Image: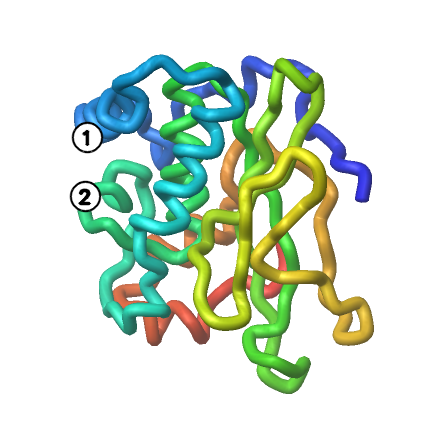
């Protein structure tokens, strides 16, 4: 799939946002901790991705009732759903001057369409050394989900099943989708959030 940038100005993918609060002291400390040694661009992206994927729990996977939204909240509580985890990955990488955007998929909530649909969030990162974008999904791996860092081929958490009307959205957004952020802010626990996940961008 050909990715389409919402903005052709890379600076728009470096902006600090309310939910991508990379000047927050917690974010700055984590950046200093993760990248205490000198790393090249690809190493920085891989380290940040694997940290968010593996060290930040997916709230549903651990059956948590807590909902996080801002990157600093995700880091503090060490958990979040995909919308929140994508905010944290964006914050870590934007703090390091690496353009990072937001991408989305429309997936079934369960194995089949009768379970309903939801929007799933992931990130796109621009590699200056390769002069191209790659998508990364830091949702968190589990049985049946195996997202990996790769500059050669996408290894996302969820393959699109067109027969079930699932969809890959090609646009790389500069900010998180308002519907996803609203869902995080208007629900008080994860069980409630599950039934109120947006089904469309």
- Where residue 118 appears, as percent x and y from the top left, is 57, 66
Q: How crowded is mark 2: few (under 14 residues within 10 Å), some or many (20 or more)?
A: few
- Where residue 187 appears, as percent x and y from the top left, is 33, 64
Q: Residues within 10 Å of mark 1 (few under 14, many from 20)?
A: some
Q: Along the horizontal axis of the image, is 78 left or right of 190?
A: left
For image coordinates 25% across by 42% down, the residue present is 75
Q: Against 125, is 98 above or below?
A: above
For image coordinates 27% across by 68% down, the residue present is 189
For image coordinates 61% across by 52% down, the residue present is 156
Q: Are marks 1 and 2 in contact (CB under 8 Å)?
A: yes
Any mark on residue 76, and which? 2
Disc on the earlier residue, 1 or 2: 1
Total labels: the figure holds: 2
Q: Quadrant of the N terminus?
A: top right
Any mark on residue 26, and which? 1
Q: In terms of secondary structure, where does tag 2 sit?
A: helix
Q: Along the horizontal axis of the image, is 158 left or right of 43?
A: right
The answer to whether any part of residue 106 appears in the image is: yes
For image coordinates 30% across by 49% down, the residue present is 55
- Quadrant hosting residue 26: top left
Farthest residue in the bottom direction? 114
Query: What distance separates the C-alpha of mark 1 from that of mark 2?
Result: 7 Å
Front residue of 140 and 102? 140
The answer to whether any part of residue 24 appears in the image is: no
Q: Against 16, is 9 above or below?
A: above
- Quadrant hosting residue 81: bottom left
């Amino acid at each position: 799939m050909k990715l389409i940038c919402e903005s052709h100005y890379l600076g728009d993918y470096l902006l600090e946002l309310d939910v991508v609060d990379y000047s927050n002291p917690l974010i700055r400390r984590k950046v200093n901790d993760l990248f205490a040694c000198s790393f090249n661009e690809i190493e920085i992206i891989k380290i940040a991705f694997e940290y968010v994927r593996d060290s930040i729990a997916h709230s549903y996977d651990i059956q948590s009732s807590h909902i996080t939204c801002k990157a600093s909240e995700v880091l503090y509580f060490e958990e979040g759903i995909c919308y929140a985890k994508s905010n944290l990955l964006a914050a870590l990488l934007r703090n390091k001057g690496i353009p990072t955007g937001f991408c989305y998929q429309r997936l079934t909530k369960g194995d089949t369409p009768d379970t309903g649909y939801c929007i799933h969030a992931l990130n796109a990162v621009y590699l200056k050394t390769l002069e191209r974008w790659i998508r990364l999904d830091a949702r968190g791996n589990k049985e049946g989900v195996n997202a990996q860092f790769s500059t050669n081929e996408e290894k996302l958490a969820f393959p699109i099943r067109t027969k079930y009307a699932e969809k890959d959205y090609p646009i790389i957004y500069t900010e998180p989708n308002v519907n996803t952020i609203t869902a995080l802010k208007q629900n008080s626990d994860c069980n409630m959030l599950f039934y109120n996940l947006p089904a469309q961008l």
